[in-house]
Image (tube, rainbow, N blue to C red):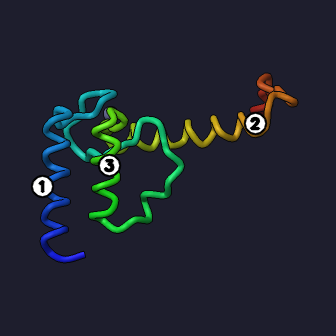
Amino acid sequence: MGRRQREWARLTRARMMRQMGNKCACCGATQGLEFDVIRPTGQHHARLEYSVRTSYYLHQFRQGNLQILCKPHNVIKAARLISLSDLLREGDKSNNSTTPSSSGT
Ligand SMILES: [Zn+2]
């Protein structure tokens, strides 16, 4: 957890970003980019220390399981995954997709 490790993490992130084209995999945005593990491994990597998280990302990158997303797309993907796992947990016992739209004044 020294300065050298932090420097390594910074360089590694920059290198991975470059190799993935420095842009969002969805829309090609080049600003506000974040790493995204394509198929989540269930690890709470967000809590990990910076350099530990970086080596986790590097590991996923080598397995072809890492992409770059802009902030909006990262949020969208995270929301989808959450709702997807909710759906899987729920099953389709109550499929009320037709909600009556009572938007009167
Ligand atoms: Zn995007």
Q: Amino acid at mark 3?
A: Tyr
Q: Report if the beta carbon of the residue with label 1 is closer than 8 angstroms to ligand 1.
A: no
Q: Residues within 10 Å of mark 3 (few under 14, many from 20)?
A: many
- Name the residue located 42 percent from the left edge and 36 percent from the top edge: 38
Q: Amino acid at mark 1?
A: Leu
Q: Residues within 10 Å of mark 1 (few under 14, many from 20)?
A: few
Q: Position of residue 32 (x, y in %)?
A: 26, 47
- Name the residue located 39 percent from the left edge and 37 percent from the top edge: 73
Q: Residue furthest right?
A: 93
Q: Real-space Cα distance between discs 2 and 1?
A: 57 Å
Labels 1 and 3: the sequence-earlier one = 1
- The residue beneath circle 1 is 11
Labels 2 and 1: the sequence-earlier one = 1
What is the secondary structure assignment of the residue under circle 2?
Answer: loop
- Name the residue located 60 percent from the left edge and 43 percent from the top edge: 82
Q: Residues within 10 Å of mark 2 (few under 14, many from 20)?
A: few
- The residue beneath circle 2 is 105
Image quarter hosting the C terminus: top right
Q: Position of residue 86 (x, y in %)?
A: 69, 41
Q: Real-space Cα distance between discs 1 and 3?
A: 13 Å
Q: Quadrant of ligand 1?
A: top left
Q: Position of residue 1 (x, y in %)?
A: 25, 75
Q: Amino acid at mark 2?
A: Thr
Residue 85: numbered disc: none
Q: Is residue 87 left or right of residue 78?
A: right
- The residue beneath circle 3 is 57
